């Protein structure tokens, strides 16, 4: 497992780390056994003492690609396991009999690996499917019925809803609540064996219809649903509810710390109730897993819901799950994000117990920070305008090209130097010339001198315009003996330095300039439909000219285009001879503006 290089010393503590450290210090999980595979109490009793000091899990539903919120959960769960000598289980929560898409399963595993984590530990692959536990879940259901802790309710869904009561009114017992365990067992088997219609009955835990926590008012734990499951086929026509399945999955896998988002806080009493009942019956092993809740990630300008992201894809508002504007892990990766940047982000935002919004600039800052130290530099002209040096032939010789070079990275001399030419004709940024300079403009305008970065000082002499008055060429004179790095080159002081690429050796490239996908920080603020908040200018494609060192770029390579930002060679479309670069992040934070 890789870890972010933590120049900042020890990882910042948080309430989950404190809980784990406390548990370890008090041997809360000492003596636990693990049989090498998930299973019931008897199974683990035969196992070895667990070599993992803690067990956490990451349990996505395979119904889409993972997003930045999942990245937080992955870094948290796998990170805690790594830091405390534990294991994090990779578990597909596939108890819903919906068609499981292999594309999503593969995508999820790929995302976790790419982020730098692995579920291989102590010689075991901890990759699990919750649907493998259906047999046990049913056995647990029968046990609860036999012990008088569950009953089959045949009220209509509407009656059940009304009888549940609400915040101010206690619930009313179902007329079916007092059936005998024998009767209930028969009815549960009728449910299982397909003798009841979908929706005709549910199995409910018998807890407390007057509980102030509505989740404890006899929650449903099994429902009838005739649906083919990708793993178990047509074996079952009843399926467990999520709130019943999840604690059992944790228990069978001997999870110690089950970490979920805050919306499950009210479910914790049921989580504990269920596991205590099953442990009393000897079905699951002690010590029991515990659930802890943390605040989900909310990021400005971003949607973190697989369902809504799926909508952007299906309605073709973006080019796919890996569109570089998507907050999916595949989208961020294609945009130019690195695992290090996302790990740093997860660490920097930390974990808390109250919901808040993280500013998008925090994420971008992490990318900038990690790429700054590693990305090779290059010059690129994104909005090319031709510059002609009038005295070039006289000074350098007709058709001559002058060799120039620059460090690959300003702080890593060992990475060597890039080579490129300067000639009579160059490409410069259109924005670096103003015929009539605005206040504070220090770059090219007639009569002003600037330095061509890594090259000579030039003095602007004029420009040529087309019929519409648009500037199509700028003219300048080269000032002799001013080449960067030569003695006396800085005798002439200039205020502006501009980047450029020679016409002679510049490469054509497609550059995709991305901006935020949504116009507002809260795309669904004020009850708005997020589809109406899309930024119509979130993608601008330009034809750029880039320096020749980029000819060897391969897909996924990242660069700093000097003065512009960090760019990644597009992993889908970039090809030798047909370069395509994505803007990953600008050099400066522009979100406040
Ligand atoms: P979605 O609504 O996007 O499908 P989910 O919570 O239903 O999200 P799951 O596939 O069930 O998605 O998520 C797997 C894990 O990722 C869960 O443990 C969940 O708590 C966590 N997770 C999902 N979204 C976020 C988020 N925004 N911040 C932190 N953790 C998240
Ligand atoms: Mg979900």
Image (cartoon, grey):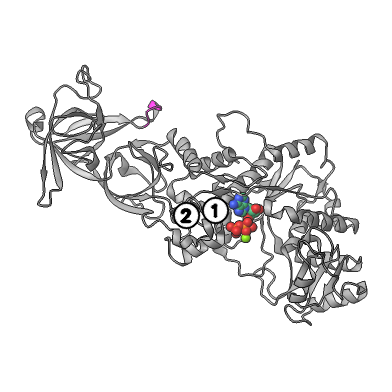
> At which x and y percent is residue 97?
66, 70
Q: Is residue 393 left or right of residue 241?
A: left
**Numbered tag placed on residue 275 in the rendering:** none
> At which x and y percent is residue 169?
80, 64
**Numbered tag placed on residue 326 in the rendering:** 2
User: Where 188 falls versus 435 (above or below)?
Assistant: below
Q: Is residue 438 left or right of residue 236?
A: left
Quadrant of the image for the C terminus? top left
Seen at 40% across and 48% down, the residue is 555
Q: Residue 76 lies in what quarter of the image?
A: top right
Circle 2 Cα neighbour tier, 10 Å, few/some/many (<14 / 14–19 / ≥20): many
Q: Answer yes or no: do the residues labelled 2 and 1 have beta carbons within 8 Å?
A: yes
Seen at 66% across and 40% down, the residue is 82
User: Where 498 falls versus 519 (above or below)?
Assistant: above
Circle 1 Cα neighbour tier, 10 Å, few/some/many (<14 / 14–19 / ≥20): many
Distance between the alpha carbons at the discs numbered 2 and 1? 8 Å
Q: Is residue 442 left or right of residue 216?
A: left
Tell which circle, 2 or 1, labels the residue nearer the N-terminal end.
1
Look at mark 1 in the image and give the residue it sits on.
Answer: 67
Tell me which image quadrant ligand 1 sits in. bottom right
Q: Is residue 577 left or right of residue 23?
A: left
State whether residue 2 appears in this view: no
View extreme (left): residue: 394
State whether residue 577 appears in this view: yes
In the rendered image, residue 412 lying in the magenta stretch gets the answer: yes
Q: Specify start and end residues of the magenta stretch as a single range.
A: 409-413
> At which x and y percent is residue 87?
70, 45
């Amino acid at each position: 497992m890789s870890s972010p290089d933590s120049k900042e010393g020890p990882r910042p503590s948080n309430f989950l780390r404190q809980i784990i450290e406390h548990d370890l210090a008090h041997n809360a999980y000492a003596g636990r056994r693990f049989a090498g595979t998930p299973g019931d109490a008897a199974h683990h009793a035969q196992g070895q003492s667990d070599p993992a000091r803690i067990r956490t899990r990451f349990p996505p539903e395979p119904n889409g690609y993972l997003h930045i919120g999942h990245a937080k959960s992955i870094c948290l769960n796998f990170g805690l396991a790594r830091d405390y000598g534990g294991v994090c289980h990779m578990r597909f929560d596939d108890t819903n009999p919906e068609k499981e898409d292999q594309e999503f399963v593969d995508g999820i595993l790929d995302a976790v690996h790419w982020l730098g984590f692995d579920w291989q530990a102590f010689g075991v692959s901890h990759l699990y499917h919750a649907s493998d536990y259906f047999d046990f879940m049913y056995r647990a259901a029968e046990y609860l019925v036999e012990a008088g802790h569950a009953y089959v309710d045949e009220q209509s869904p509407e009656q059940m809803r009304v009888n549940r009561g609400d915040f101010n009114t206690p619930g009313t017992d179902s007329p079916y609540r007092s059936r005998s365990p024998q009767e209930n067992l028969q009815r549960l088997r009728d449910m299982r064996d397909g003798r009841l219609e979908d929706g005709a009955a549910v199995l409910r835990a018998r807890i407390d219809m007057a509980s102030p926590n509505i989740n404890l008012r006899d929650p449903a734990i099994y429902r009838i649903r005739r649906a083919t499951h990708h793993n178990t086929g047509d074996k079952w026509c009843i399926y467990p509810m999520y709130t019943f399945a999840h604690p059992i999955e944790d228990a069978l896998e001997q999870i110690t710390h089950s970490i979920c988002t805050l919306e499950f806080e009210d479910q914790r009493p049921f989580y504990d109730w269920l596991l205590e009942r099953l442990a009393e019956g000897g079905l699951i092993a002690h010590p029991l897993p515990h659930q802890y809740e943390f605040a989900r990630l909310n990021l400005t300008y971003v949607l973190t819901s697989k369902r809504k992201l799926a909508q952007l894809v299906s309605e073709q508002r973006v080019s796919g799950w890996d569109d570089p504007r998507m907050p999916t892990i595949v989208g961020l990766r294609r945009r130019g994000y690195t695992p290090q940047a996302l790990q740093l982000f997860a660490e920097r935002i930390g974990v808390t117990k109250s919901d808040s919004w993280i500013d998008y600039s925090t994420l971008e800052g992490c990318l900038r920070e990690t790429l700054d130290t590693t990305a090779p530099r290059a010059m690129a002209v994104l909005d090319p305008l031709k510059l002609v040096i009038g005295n070039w032939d006289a000074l350098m010789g007709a058709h001559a090209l002058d060799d120039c070079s620059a460090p690959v990275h300003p702080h890593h001399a060992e990475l060597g130097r890039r080579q490129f030419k300067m000639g009579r004709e160059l490409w410069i940024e259109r924005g670096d010339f103003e015929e009539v300079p605005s206040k504070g403009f220090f770059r090219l305008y007639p009569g002003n001198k600037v330095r061509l970065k890594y090259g000579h000082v030039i003095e602007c002499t004029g420009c040529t315009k087309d019929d519409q008055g648009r500037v199509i060429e700028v003219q300048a004179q080269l000032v002799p003996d001013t080449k960067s790095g030569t003695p006396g080159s800085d005798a002439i002081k200039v205020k502006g330095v501009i980047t450029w690429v020679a016409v002679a050796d510049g490469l054509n490239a497609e550059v995709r300039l991305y901006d935020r996908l949504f116009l507002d920080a809260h795309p669904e603020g004020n009850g708005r439909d997020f589809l109406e908040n899309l930024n119509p200018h979130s993608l601008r494609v330009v034809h750029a000219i880039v320096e020749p060192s980029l000819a060897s770029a391969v897909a996924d390579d990242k660069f700093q285009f000097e003065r512009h930002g960090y760019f990644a060679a597009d992993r889908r479309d970039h090809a030798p001879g047909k370069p395509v670069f994505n803007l990953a992040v600008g050099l400066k934070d522009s979100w406040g503006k």
